Amino acid sequence: MSAKRQQRIDRLRDALEARDVLRLKDAAEMLGVSEMTVRRDIAACDGCLTYLGGYIVTPPAASAAKGYVFDQEQSSHTEAKRAASQAAAALIQPHETIFLDCGTTIPHLAAALPDDIRLTVICYAINVAEIVCRRPGLQVILLGGVYHPSSASFSGAAGLTQLEGLRIDKAFISAGGVHGTRGVSCSNSHEVAIKQTAMANALTKVLVVDATKIDAVKPFYFTPLDQFDIVTADTGVSPDAAEMIRQCGPRLILG
């Protein structure tokens, strides 16, 4: 790598330390080069930066030094998350429009999509977009906005307005807590409006969780459990928890 390119990359990383997200146009103006040059620099930096949807961000794994716990969560209960996601992937039909939520479970669903399937995929998280954007049969709609390291996702009025104008066959929603009386909840307030809008615009609502999320409660409530048509989970779900889900209305599918 040339010395000039390394200097530009270092300046981008310094800028991201201060603001978490940087528009491509602003980065090019800051460095005094073209937008294409900035994109080439990012491609050459061995994953230290990521470019998605017009924004430059620090990848999730590289954010740990800033108190970021997402990467730690990503490595927990992996097999259970994969099982729940594989059960969810089996519900998808060719040529559908699907919404993929943020979190550490949904990337397993993105990875489980059949290689030859054709879909329109709506997403707003980097760890999901990085998977689906590499798949040739997928048309990807990435919702933009302000980047949140706490869930490697974007949020904002523009992205929400875009989502409101879309129609979805199946919305696959993640959650940090699933409770029979306290409803379904998550850890980040910025996710609430996006989850609710995706569900409102979807024909079928699917909750994708591993067994550890059931009977848990997180700070930010976004919907009662009975608003989901289907819950996919792993076989670690207890008989009592399974009965609770069924009594609330959704069909339970165990991977």
Image (cartoon, grey):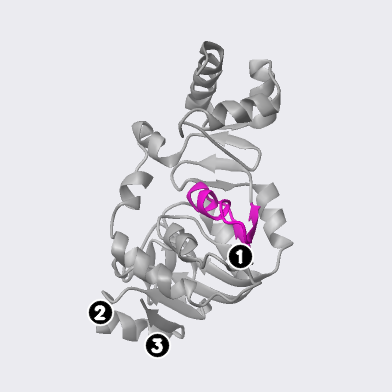
The numbered mark at residue 247 is: 3
Q: Classify 80 as above or below 7.
A: below
Q: Residue 191 location, x and y as percent?
A: 52, 54
- Which residue is pictured at 62% across the width and 30% down the height? 39
* Amino acid carrying mark 2 in the image: Ser
Q: In screen coordinates, is 59 left or right of 138?
A: left
- Which residue is pictured at 51% across the width and 81% down the height? 229
Q: Looking at the picture, tell me which residue is in the foreground, 222 or 143.
A: 143
Q: Residue 78 location, x and y as percent?
A: 31, 59
Mark sitting earlier along the chain (2/3): 2
Report if the CB atoms under discs 2 and 3 are less than 8 Å apart: no
Q: Quadrant of the C terminus?
A: bottom left
* Amino acid carrying mark 3 in the image: Gln
Give the tally of numbered discs.
3
The numbered mark at residue 124 is: none
The numbered mark at residue 238 is: 2
- Could you tell me how far apart the alpha carbons at marks 1 and 3 are, in whole angstroms? 24 Å
Q: Mark 1 points at which residue?
A: 198
Q: Is mark 2 on a helix, strand or loop?
A: loop
Q: Nearer the viewer, mark 2 or mark 3?
A: 2
Extreme-right residue of the structure: 165
